[in-house]
Each structure stands twice: as C-alpha cells, then as structure tokens.
Amino acid sequence: MTREEKKAKLLKYKTRKQRFIRITTQFFVWLGVAVIYYIGFSVFFDTPVEYELKHSTDMMREEYDRLSARYDSLSLVLDNVIERDRNVFNILFESTPYELDSEFESERLALHEKLLARSSRQLRRQLDSKVAEMQKKMAVLEESHEQLHREIEKCGKGLNNIPSIQPVINSQLTLLTAGYGTLMHPFYRTLQSHQGVDYTVPEGSSVFATADGIVKEVSGRNSTFGQNIVIDHGNGYLTQYCHLSASKVRKGQRVRRGDIIALSGNSGLSLSPHLHYEVRYEGMRVDPIHYFFMELTPDEYRRIIKISQSGMQSFD
C-alpha cells in the first residue's frame, strides 16, 4: 500500500469518526432540548388529560360545596322545625320532650368517618342521597307541623268553652272552705253529698264566668240555691253559681271567660255568705277542683287539693 493510499484511508476514517461524533452530539442535543421542552411544558402547561381531570375536579368541588351548603341549610331548617315542635310539646303537655340527639351522636360520628373514607364520586352520591333523604324528612315534618297546628287551632277554639278558672279571686287559695264529696250538712247535721265547692267570700264579691258560653238560666229565688245562674258552655259542660245577691247577666246572653256575671251573697239555704260553684259534664256533676288548671301551678294545684279534702262541713 502506497503512502498516498494510507493517507486517503486515514482521511476517510477521520471523516467517518467526525460524522459519528456530529450525529451523536446532535442526537443528545435534540434529546436534551426535547426533555427540557417536555419538563417546561409539563410545569407551565396542562396536557388535555390533565386539563380534563382538573376541570372535573373543580366541578366536583363546586358541586360538593353546593351540596354542603344545601345540607347545612336543610339542617338549620330541620333544627328550627324540631325547636317549634318542642315548643308546641311544652305548651300542650307542660313538659320537656325526650332528647334524641345523644342517641344519634355515635351514628353521626360513624357517618362522618365513612364519608372521609369514600372517594369524591362516592362522596357526591352519598351527599345527594342524604340531601334527598333530608328533603323527604323536611316534607314529612312540615306536613306534620301544619297538621298539628291545625289541630291546635281546632282544639284551641274548644278550650275557651271548658271551665278552667276559679269563679272568684282566690290568688292565695285561702277562700276555698269546702270541697267536692261527702261532707257534714250545716243544717241537717248528717253526712250528705256535696257536689260542688264553697268559697267564703264577703257578700257583694264579684263572681266570674269560668268559660265562654250562653246563660241558660237566671233564677231569682230557690229554696236551696237561692239566686243562681247556670251557664251552658257547649261540648257537654254546664256551670252553676249559687247563693248570689245580684245577677249581672240575663238569660240567653253570651258571656266570655272572666266576665263578671253576678255578686256573691247569702241567699237560699246558706249558713253564711259564700259562693257555691258546680261543674257538670254530660249531665253529671264533677269535681270543680280539676277545672282550675289555667291559673294554677302544679304546686298550687296540689295545695288546693289538700285544702278541699280537709273540710268536714259545707256551707249549704
């Protein structure tokens, strides 16, 4: 091999080597550029898949916030309805209803733990279900409350016609001297049925209607009851006020609870000035003590029961 051939061969080898180095260098340069471009694009720009995922997440977050706000609003309304029902219970039964919150506290905590363990999609379905369930409960509670309100209004109209106060002013409970039952008659000196209560009040004291009604009878004189008034309250209730000195109403007149209908006296078969008061229901005389509930506390009621049971002699 001549010297010129060796030079040509060496030149050809160097040319191939340089081409390989150039291609390799270009490859790594473009690879670096691609990596840098990918990293930069990933940091500053979202891929279509990432954009869709982020958009879906934002929508789910907004939906979650909306459902949470709706749930809180319904919870507040439900609490208000429960509080109104509790107030109605207090008014009707004069007692506090049994509290159920403590019994469901563990269930609420368990529900919160379950919610935290669920995925976003499951959480959304769970919230939708809970909101729908609460809406059903709200509808039932509202209907129940409206029905209860209608019943209260219906009963309230009838309550005005039930005797529920004392016929004289007796705030200290000291004027009641004879109760309902078997007592010693002041004139015959024998045990006889006393079918009302007696109040020892000065002659001329005001006598009040104990419920709304219509004056059924105004008797000027009666050998036993003297001057007396009978009021028909409807619903089977009648009240009678005896031994009066003067009447302030006439037969057929409509009266309301608390109206002054007469003045007390000592007419008829009476030992001393007093008022004899009776309550009748469905034609049967009943103990008037049980019809003072509107103006007596439980302690006062127990006290007046003892007073009525302690008397041994009536005044008529």
Image (tube, rainbow, N blue to C red):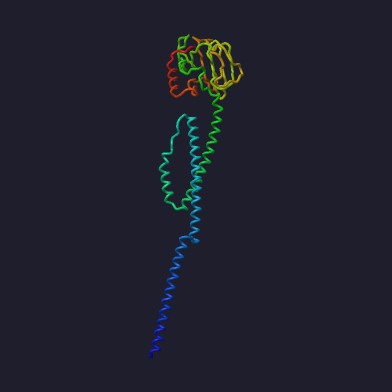
Instruction: Give how far across and how far down residue 86 sits, in percent.
Output: 48, 34
106 is higher (above) or lower (below) than 308: below
Q: Quadrant of residue 250?
A: top right
Return the residue nearer the eye: 98 or 66: 66
Give coordinates of residue 200: x percent, y percent: 48, 13
Most extreme residue toward the bottom is: 2
| Residue 133 locus on image (x, y percent) | 50, 45
Vertical arrangement, residue 169 with respect to residue 38, above or below:
above
Residue 163 on image: x %, y %? 53, 22
Q: Residue at x 47, y 18 (%)?
A: 171
Q: Is residue 119 left or right of residue 251?
A: left
Report the front residue among 25 and 120: 25
The residue positioned 41% from the left and 84% from the top of the image is 11
Looking at the image, which residue is at 43% across and 36% down? 99
Q: Quadrant of residue 174?
A: top left
Q: Is residue 114 depicted above or below 28 in this figure?
A: above
How many labels, in total? Answer: 0
| Residue situated in front as seen by the camera: 88 or 189 | 88
Give the farthest residue toward the right: 252
Q: Where does the N terminus fall, quadrant-wise?
A: bottom left
